[in-house]
Image: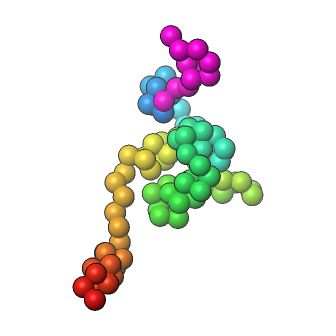
Amino acid sequence: MQSGQGANVKTARQIMATRPATDTVLLTFKEAMDFLRVSRSTIYRLMWSGQLRGHKVGSTWRFYESDLLNAVASPVYEPAAKRSAQTLEGQG
């Protein structure tokens, strides 16, 4: 058994496995960061790229746990326009 804080940390899958499937949980921005173990800028990047859907409640953001899990499970695709621009630059 590990000592310290690391022994009490659960993975996202373990958290989801202990809750009923019908249980809908909204997390704050900070809770979302802790849930995914990522930085604030990574959460924003996932939102801006369209991978993560956030909900504005008043002046704060809220996230469904299922949306967080889907965001990290979905593959990242580079837009075709960006790929072709990089290809053209390489040919120059």
The extreme top residue here reads: 1
Q: Nearer the viewer, residue 57 or 81?
A: 81
Residue 51 in picture, x, y percent from top left: 45, 57
Residue 87 in picture, x, y percent from top left: 27, 79
Is 5 a magenta residue? yes
Is 70 a magenta residue? no
Quadrant of the image for the C terminus? bottom left
Q: Nearer the viewer, residue 5 or 36?
A: 5
Find residue 33 and report its image quarter: top right
Span of residues in magenta: 1-11
Residue 12 in picture, x, y percent from top left: 48, 33
Residue 81 in picture, x, y percent from top left: 34, 79
Q: Nearer the viewer, residue 9 or 60?
A: 9
The reply to whether residue 19 is in sight is: no
Judge from the rendering whether residue 80 lies leftward or rightward of residue 21; answer left or right: left
Write the residue at 44% across / 50% down.
71
The reply to whether residue 75 is in sight is: yes
Write the residue at 50% across / 57% down.
46
**Above or below — where is 39 with respect to 44?**
above
Write the residue at 34% across / 54% down.
75
Q: Main secondary structure of the magenta part?
A: loop
Q: Nearer the viewer, residue 36 or 7?
A: 7
**Above or below — where is 89 with respect to 57?**
below
The extreme left residue here reads: 91
Judge from the rendering whether residue 42 lies leftward or rightward of residue 62; answer left or right: left
Q: How many marks?
A: 0
Write the residue at 66% across / 44% down.
30
Find residue 9 and report its image quarter: top right
